[in-house]
Amino acid sequence: MARVCRWAYLGRVAYEAGLRLQRALAEAVSAGADDVLLLLEHPPVITLGRRASRADILVDPAALAARGIAVYETNRGGLVTYHGPGQLVGYPIAALRALTGGDVVRYVWGLEEALIRTLATLGIAAGRHPQHRGVWVGDAKIGAVGVAISRGVTMHGFALNLQPELAHFALIRPCGLAGQPVTSVAALRGYAVALPVAATLVATALGAVFDWEMVPVAPAHLWAAALERPASLPAGRP
Protein backbone atom coordinates (compact mmCIF):
# COMPACT_ATOMS: atom_id res chain seq x y z
CA MET A 1 0.00 0.00 0.00
CA ALA A 2 1.29 3.45 -0.91
CA ARG A 3 2.32 5.64 2.01
CA VAL A 4 0.19 8.79 2.40
CA CYS A 5 1.81 12.20 1.96
CA ARG A 6 -0.27 15.23 2.91
CA TRP A 7 0.74 18.30 0.93
CA ALA A 8 -0.15 21.95 0.64
CA TYR A 9 0.97 25.09 -1.14
CA LEU A 10 1.42 27.71 1.57
CA GLY A 11 2.19 30.81 -0.48
CA ARG A 12 4.89 33.18 0.79
CA VAL A 13 6.27 32.19 4.18
CA ALA A 14 9.06 33.85 6.19
CA TYR A 15 12.09 31.57 6.34
CA GLU A 16 12.14 31.27 10.13
CA ALA A 17 8.42 30.49 10.20
CA GLY A 18 8.98 27.75 7.64
CA LEU A 19 11.69 26.25 9.83
CA ARG A 20 9.42 26.23 12.84
CA LEU A 21 6.76 24.47 10.82
CA GLN A 22 9.24 21.89 9.55
CA ARG A 23 10.47 21.12 13.04
CA ALA A 24 7.00 20.76 14.47
CA LEU A 25 5.84 18.48 11.66
CA ALA A 26 9.06 16.43 11.88
CA GLU A 27 8.20 15.66 15.50
CA ALA A 28 4.77 14.46 14.40
CA VAL A 29 6.17 12.28 11.60
CA SER A 30 8.75 10.83 13.99
CA ALA A 31 5.84 9.87 16.25
CA GLY A 32 4.08 8.06 13.40
CA ALA A 33 2.07 10.72 11.56
CA ASP A 34 1.75 10.76 7.77
CA ASP A 35 4.54 12.24 5.67
CA VAL A 36 4.08 15.90 4.70
CA LEU A 37 5.17 18.00 1.74
CA LEU A 38 5.32 21.79 2.21
CA LEU A 39 5.46 23.85 -0.98
CA LEU A 40 5.98 27.61 -0.71
CA GLU A 41 8.10 30.60 -1.56
CA HIS A 42 10.24 32.73 0.75
CA PRO A 43 11.00 36.45 0.94
CA PRO A 44 14.61 37.07 -0.16
CA VAL A 45 17.00 35.07 2.03
CA ILE A 46 20.46 33.51 1.83
CA THR A 47 20.95 30.22 3.64
CA LEU A 48 24.17 28.49 4.63
CA GLY A 49 24.38 24.71 4.80
CA ARG A 50 26.59 22.75 7.19
CA ARG A 51 29.63 22.97 4.87
CA ALA A 52 29.08 26.58 3.84
CA SER A 53 31.48 29.46 4.32
CA ARG A 54 30.52 33.09 4.86
CA ALA A 55 33.16 33.83 2.20
CA ASP A 56 30.66 32.52 -0.37
CA ILE A 57 28.48 35.57 0.35
CA LEU A 58 30.02 38.18 -1.91
CA VAL A 59 28.59 41.36 -0.37
CA ASP A 60 28.75 42.74 3.15
CA PRO A 61 25.90 42.49 5.66
CA ALA A 62 24.98 46.15 5.28
CA ALA A 63 24.47 45.73 1.54
CA LEU A 64 22.27 42.69 2.13
CA ALA A 65 20.25 44.52 4.77
CA ALA A 66 19.72 47.42 2.37
CA ARG A 67 18.24 44.96 -0.12
CA GLY A 68 16.08 43.34 2.57
CA ILE A 69 17.89 40.00 2.30
CA ALA A 70 18.26 37.96 5.50
CA VAL A 71 20.96 35.35 6.18
CA TYR A 72 20.42 32.08 8.07
CA GLU A 73 22.70 29.24 9.04
CA THR A 74 20.91 25.91 8.75
CA ASN A 75 21.42 22.22 9.50
CA ARG A 76 20.88 21.11 5.90
CA GLY A 77 23.60 19.62 3.74
CA GLY A 78 25.32 21.63 1.05
CA LEU A 79 26.77 25.11 0.87
CA VAL A 80 25.20 28.52 0.25
CA THR A 81 22.01 29.20 -1.68
CA TYR A 82 19.43 31.91 -2.27
CA HIS A 83 15.66 31.75 -1.91
CA GLY A 84 13.23 34.42 -3.00
CA PRO A 85 9.91 35.25 -4.62
CA GLY A 86 9.31 33.37 -7.85
CA GLN A 87 11.18 30.30 -6.63
CA LEU A 88 9.20 27.22 -5.58
CA VAL A 89 10.66 25.69 -2.42
CA GLY A 90 9.73 22.20 -1.28
CA TYR A 91 10.17 20.70 2.18
CA PRO A 92 9.30 16.99 2.36
CA ILE A 93 8.95 15.90 5.99
CA ALA A 94 9.09 12.12 5.65
CA ALA A 95 10.11 8.93 7.43
CA LEU A 96 13.19 8.03 5.41
CA ARG A 97 13.26 4.32 6.22
CA ALA A 98 9.69 3.83 5.01
CA LEU A 99 10.37 5.98 1.95
CA THR A 100 13.70 4.64 0.66
CA GLY A 101 14.81 2.04 3.18
CA GLY A 102 16.91 4.76 4.81
CA ASP A 103 18.94 5.42 1.65
CA VAL A 104 19.80 9.15 1.62
CA VAL A 105 21.42 9.04 -1.83
CA ARG A 106 18.31 7.45 -3.30
CA TYR A 107 16.19 10.08 -1.59
CA VAL A 108 18.20 12.97 -3.05
CA TRP A 109 18.09 11.28 -6.47
CA GLY A 110 14.30 11.10 -6.14
CA LEU A 111 14.01 14.82 -5.39
CA GLU A 112 16.10 15.61 -8.45
CA GLU A 113 14.04 13.20 -10.56
CA ALA A 114 10.78 14.87 -9.54
CA LEU A 115 12.13 18.30 -10.57
CA ILE A 116 13.39 16.89 -13.88
CA ARG A 117 9.93 15.44 -14.60
CA THR A 118 8.24 18.69 -13.64
CA LEU A 119 10.47 20.68 -15.97
CA ALA A 120 9.78 18.22 -18.79
CA THR A 121 6.07 18.94 -18.31
CA LEU A 122 6.92 22.64 -18.74
CA GLY A 123 8.82 21.91 -21.96
CA ILE A 124 12.34 22.08 -20.52
CA ALA A 125 14.83 19.23 -20.92
CA ALA A 126 16.78 19.18 -17.65
CA GLY A 127 19.13 16.64 -16.13
CA ARG A 128 21.86 15.96 -13.60
CA HIS A 129 25.43 17.24 -13.46
CA PRO A 130 28.20 14.62 -13.46
CA GLN A 131 29.89 16.24 -10.45
CA HIS A 132 27.36 18.39 -8.61
CA ARG A 133 23.97 17.82 -7.03
CA GLY A 134 20.83 19.59 -8.20
CA VAL A 135 19.07 19.92 -11.53
CA TRP A 136 20.70 21.50 -14.57
CA VAL A 137 19.90 22.72 -18.04
CA GLY A 138 23.19 22.46 -19.87
CA ASP A 139 25.76 24.12 -17.61
CA ALA A 140 23.18 26.31 -15.83
CA LYS A 141 21.58 25.31 -12.54
CA ILE A 142 17.80 25.54 -12.32
CA GLY A 143 17.09 23.46 -9.21
CA ALA A 144 18.94 23.05 -5.91
CA VAL A 145 18.72 20.20 -3.40
CA GLY A 146 19.87 20.27 0.23
CA VAL A 147 18.49 17.98 2.92
CA ALA A 148 18.83 17.14 6.59
CA ILE A 149 17.88 13.94 8.40
CA SER A 150 16.94 14.13 12.07
CA ARG A 151 15.87 11.00 13.97
CA GLY A 152 15.15 9.32 10.65
CA VAL A 153 12.91 12.13 9.37
CA THR A 154 13.78 14.34 6.40
CA MET A 155 13.84 18.14 6.53
CA HIS A 156 14.69 20.94 4.08
CA GLY A 157 14.56 19.74 0.46
CA PHE A 158 14.70 21.56 -2.87
CA ALA A 159 14.21 24.84 -4.71
CA LEU A 160 13.06 25.22 -8.32
CA ASN A 161 13.69 28.49 -10.14
CA LEU A 162 10.48 29.52 -11.86
CA GLN A 163 10.88 33.30 -12.14
CA PRO A 164 13.07 34.51 -9.26
CA GLU A 165 15.25 37.61 -9.48
CA LEU A 166 18.31 35.95 -11.02
CA ALA A 167 20.50 38.97 -10.24
CA HIS A 168 20.30 38.02 -6.55
CA PHE A 169 22.28 34.85 -7.24
CA ALA A 170 25.24 37.09 -8.11
CA LEU A 171 25.38 38.03 -4.41
CA ILE A 172 26.67 34.53 -3.59
CA ARG A 173 28.68 31.66 -5.01
CA PRO A 174 25.68 29.33 -5.49
CA CYS A 175 26.54 26.02 -3.85
CA GLY A 176 30.12 27.28 -3.66
CA LEU A 177 30.54 27.21 -7.45
CA ALA A 178 32.23 30.40 -8.65
CA GLY A 179 31.04 31.67 -12.01
CA GLN A 180 28.41 28.94 -12.42
CA PRO A 181 25.38 30.27 -14.30
CA VAL A 182 21.91 30.04 -12.77
CA THR A 183 18.76 29.97 -14.88
CA SER A 184 14.99 29.80 -14.50
CA VAL A 185 11.89 28.63 -16.32
CA ALA A 186 11.07 32.23 -17.23
CA ALA A 187 14.55 32.85 -18.64
CA LEU A 188 14.36 29.71 -20.77
CA ARG A 189 10.73 29.80 -21.87
CA GLY A 190 9.91 33.50 -21.76
CA TYR A 191 6.88 33.28 -19.49
CA ALA A 192 6.07 33.04 -15.79
CA VAL A 193 4.56 29.94 -14.21
CA ALA A 194 2.10 30.42 -11.36
CA LEU A 195 3.56 28.88 -8.22
CA PRO A 196 0.36 27.02 -7.26
CA VAL A 197 0.37 25.39 -10.70
CA ALA A 198 4.02 24.38 -10.39
CA ALA A 199 3.35 23.11 -6.86
CA THR A 200 0.71 20.71 -8.16
CA LEU A 201 3.08 19.47 -10.87
CA VAL A 202 5.87 18.89 -8.36
CA ALA A 203 3.57 17.14 -5.89
CA THR A 204 2.35 14.83 -8.64
CA ALA A 205 5.90 14.04 -9.74
CA LEU A 206 7.04 13.33 -6.18
CA GLY A 207 4.10 11.01 -5.68
CA ALA A 208 5.12 9.03 -8.75
CA VAL A 209 8.80 8.90 -7.81
CA PHE A 210 8.31 7.84 -4.18
CA ASP A 211 5.06 5.90 -4.59
CA TRP A 212 3.27 8.34 -2.31
CA GLU A 213 -0.50 8.74 -2.23
CA MET A 214 -0.58 12.53 -2.45
CA VAL A 215 -3.41 14.00 -0.39
CA PRO A 216 -3.92 17.79 -0.68
CA VAL A 217 -4.84 19.50 2.58
CA ALA A 218 -5.67 23.05 3.59
CA PRO A 219 -2.58 24.99 4.69
CA ALA A 220 -4.34 25.85 7.95
CA HIS A 221 -4.25 22.18 8.93
CA LEU A 222 -0.45 22.14 8.78
CA TRP A 223 -0.09 25.41 10.68
CA ALA A 224 -2.42 24.01 13.34
CA ALA A 225 -0.15 20.99 13.69
CA ALA A 226 2.78 23.34 14.27
CA LEU A 227 0.93 25.28 16.95
CA GLU A 228 0.19 22.04 18.76
CA ARG A 229 3.90 21.13 18.77
CA PRO A 230 5.81 24.41 19.35
CA ALA A 231 9.50 24.32 18.45
CA SER A 232 12.22 26.57 19.83
CA LEU A 233 14.16 28.45 17.17
CA PRO A 234 16.76 31.08 18.12
CA ALA A 235 16.51 34.11 15.85
CA GLY A 236 18.63 33.74 12.73
CA ARG A 237 20.01 30.31 13.60
CA PRO A 238 17.77 27.21 13.40
Image (spheres, rainbow, N blue to C red):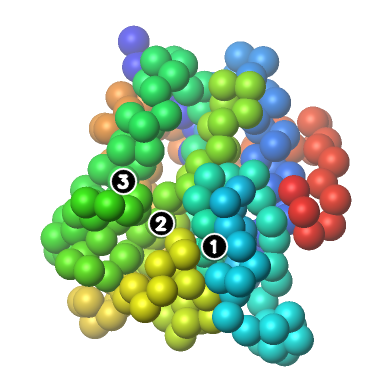
The amino acid type of the residue labelled 2 equals Ala
Nearer to me, 18 or 143: 143
Q: What's the CA distance linking mark 1 and mark 2?
A: 10 Å
Q: Residue at x 22, y 69 (%)?
A: 139
Which is nearer the N-term, disc 3 or disc 1? 1
Give the crowd class for mark 2: few <14, some 14-19, many >=20 residues within 10 Å: many
In the rendered structure, are the residues bearing label 1 and label 2 in contact, judged by CB atoms less than 8 Å apart?
no
Nearer to me, 33 or 55: 55
Give the crowd class for mark 1: few <14, some 14-19, many >=20 residues within 10 Å: many
- Measured as percent of width and height from the top left, residue 50 is found at 61, 48
- Measured as percent of width and height from the top left, residue 222 is found at 64, 38
Q: What's the CA distance linking mark 3 and mark 2?
A: 8 Å
Nearer to me, 112 or 6: 112
Visible in this render: residue 190? yes
Question: Which numbered mark, 1 or 2, is in the foreground of this view?
Answer: 1
Residue under pointer 1? 80
Residue under pointer 3? 112
Q: Hey, which quadrant is residue 221 in on the image? A: top right
Q: What's the CA distance linking mark 3 and mark 1?
A: 18 Å
Residue under pointer 2? 144
Q: Quadrant of the N terminus?
A: top left
